[in-house]
Amino acid sequence: MKYIRTIIYVLITGIFAQQHAHAQEYSGHLLCNPSLFNIQAPKKQVKKTTATALNPLSLPFFEDFTGYSVFPDSSKWQDYEVFINNTMGFKPVSRGMATFDALDYRGIPYDSFSNTNFRYADSLTSQPINLSVNVVTPGDSVYFSFFYQPQGNGYYPLIQDSLILYFKTRFGGFQKVWSVSGTSLAPFKQVMIPISDSVYYDSSFQFRFVNIGALYWADAIWNVDYIRLNSGRNQYDTAINDIGFSSDPSFLLNDYSSMPYRQFNANPGIERAGQYSVKVTNNYVTAQAVTCGYTGIGLNTGDILRANTWNPAVNVPAMGIQSVVFPRYNTLIPITSVGAYDKVVFENTFFLQSISTSDPTGNDTVVKDIIFDNYLAYDDGSAEKSYYLNLYPTLPGKIAIEYHLNTPDTMRGMSICFGKQVPFATNKFFNIVVYSSLRGVNGSSADHILYTQELCLPGYADTLNHFWNYRFDRPLALPAGTFYAGTFQPAQSGSDSLYIGLDVNRVGSNHAYYDVLSGWTPSLISGAIMMRPLLGRYIQSSSINDVQLKKQRLLLSPNPVEDQLKLEFESTAETGYYITDISGRNVLQGTIYSGKSIDISTLRQGMYFVTIVTEGIPSVTEKLIKR
C-alpha cells in the first residue's frame, strides 16, 4: 500500500492537472503500501541462489504473476521489492501483475527525506536461465517479450521517471537493452526484444527490470505482466494464446463488500447481489468459447453453498474481455449454525476449462472469500489512492459516509485506513461523529448528532486489514435504518488535509458526503473512502498495543531550551526529525544521529512538538518549550 506531501507539493509539481478535484475534495497519492506491512519477505539464501545458478531454469520462461502472495515467486525471482497484486492494473492482460513504485518490500519509501531526487528504486531480477550455446544459439531466434503499463490505478510516472530492462552478459555485468520514460495512463503494451547478440548466451543468463523514481513521492507507478522468453519466435509472435480470468469476482453482497452476518441474515434478499460476475480475457486472435463454473463453501461449517454446475459456454471475442455471469447460491448458512456475533467466511472458487494443452492454466482458477465480520465496508481492503479535503484555516471540514442496518445493533467504534503524510499527522487531531441525519441529505432539515468521539489522532499500524481501530468511550445503540459516520476536522487546529485511504476499484456510489463551505455536498470522487463502523461486541483500540511496540522513545534536553537541543533515541542510524508548531505546521526538519544537537535559535518562543522518524515510523511525539 505511501507518504503524502502537502498541498504545497501538489501545487509545485503540477499534479493537480492529473488529480480529480471536485470543489474542496481531492484524490491524492497513497505514499505507503499497508498490504506489505508486517508480512515476512522471502529471505535471500546464498546457498539456494548458488544451487540455482548450478541448476538454472530451462526455456521456456513464463510468468503472469498469478498467485496469492504479495511477493514474487522465489523459484523464478531473486529479489522481492515489487508488489504482486491484482488491483493496480487498469484493464490488465491477465489476473496478477508486478507493480513498480518507490516503496521497498516493507511498503515504505526507500528514502523519506530525499524527496526531490530520482534514483533506482524497485528491481525484479530473474533466477539464472540456461542460454548456453549447447542448448540454444542466436540462430534459434530467441525472443524476450513482456507487457507494461504506466500509472494503472495509481498515479502516472513523471517524465523523469523511467522503467528499464537489463540483460546479463556472459562476462557478469548487466547491460541496458530497453527503457521508457514516464507518461500518463496507457493500455498495457507488449514489447518484443530479440536476443541476437552472443554476449548474452550463457548458462547463467538473467534479466532485470528496474524503475527510476522520486523516492519519497512514489508516484512512479509501472505495471509489468506476462513475461515470456523462448526460442523459435519472431517479431510477429505477439499472440499470447491464453484465456483466463483478468479480475477478481464481484462481491456476493449487493452494496457492501462486508457486513456482520446477523445484519445480512436479517434481510438476505435485499443484501445479496442478483448475480455474481468475473471478467475473462481472451488473448487469442480468434474468438473462443469457454465454459466456466464455481463452487461455494461455508468455511465455518463446511456447508456446500453451491455445488459446481458448469455454465453454458460463453463466447469471448478475439483479443477481448467478456464478463461471465454466475447464478446465486442454492442455499445459505443458518444464523443458528454460526452464532449472531461470529465471523463467517464463504469461500468461492471460480474456474474455467482450458481450451488447449498449451493454454497457461494459472489464471484459470480464482478463489474469493466473502467475509462477514464485525464491520460495515464498501471497500475491498486495498487502497490505491487517498481522499482528502482542501480546508480553509478558519473553517472546519466534515466527511460522512452513509450506512444502513437491517436490524438494531451497537456501534463500538470506527476503523479508518489513513494515508501517511508529511508533515506527519501525529499531532493532527480529529473527532469521529455519528449522525442519524444530515442537513439537506435525503430530505433532512438539520444535522442530528448521535455520538462524538473527541480528540482522536491518526494511526497507521497493521491491525484490522491495515486499519486503525478507534474504540468509543461508550457503546452507541443504533436502530435499524440509515445512519452516517465520519470525521470532523476542527478549524484553527492544524488538522487540515487528513489523508484517508481510497479504494478506486469500487464501482458505483461511494455513499460519501463532505462539508467545507456551504453544507453537505455529495462526493463526486470515484472509489470507496475507507472508513468502517465497528459493530457488536467489545473491540480493542489499536492504540493500546501497537504504538508501544512500534514507536521509539525520544528524549529532549534541555527542555525548556534556548538554542541547542539534544535528541536522544534508540536507533543508531541517521534519523529524520520534524519540529511542528501548535497548529501542526512544519517549522524545522532534517536528519540527526542520537546524542547530537540541532540549532533551534531561529524559532520563536513558544510550544512545539518534536518527532523522529525511523524507517517510516514516527516516534512518540514530545512537547518542547522554546525560551
Image (cartoon, rainbow, N blue to C red):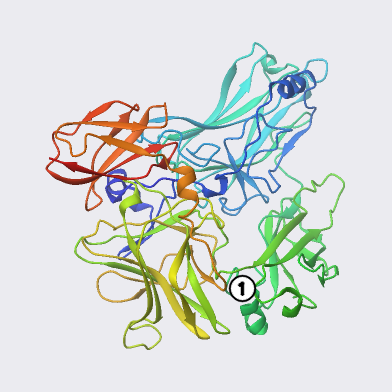
Q: From the viewer's perspective, is residue 189 above or below residue 208?
A: below
Q: Does residue 334 show up?
A: no
- Amino acid type of the residue tagged 1 in the rendering: Pro
- Tell me residue 152's x, y (percent): 52, 50
Quarter of the image where the C terminus is located: top left
Q: Secondary structure at mark 1?
A: loop
475 left or right of 381? left
Give the side of residue 486 with respect to residue 208, left or right. Answer: left
The residue labelled by disc 1 is 260
* Label 1 crowd (10 A; few <14 / some 14-19 / many >=20): many
Count of labels in the image: 1
Q: Residue furthest top?
A: 171
Residue 289: x and y in percent read: 81, 61
Query: Compared with residue 581, is residue 506 higher up or lower down, i.e. above or below?
Result: below
State the residue at coordinates (85%, 67%).
Answer: 308
Residue 178 at least partly seen: yes
Answer above or below: position of 553 versus 533: above
Residue lying at 78% horizontally and 28% vertically, measured from the top left? 231
Pick the front one: 526 or 111: 111
Residue 511 vertical position relative to residue 223 in the rendered view, above or below: below
Q: Nearer the viewer, residue 127 or 407?
A: 407
Residue 444 position, x and y percent, is: 36, 87
Q: Position of residue 486 (x, y in %)?
A: 40, 69
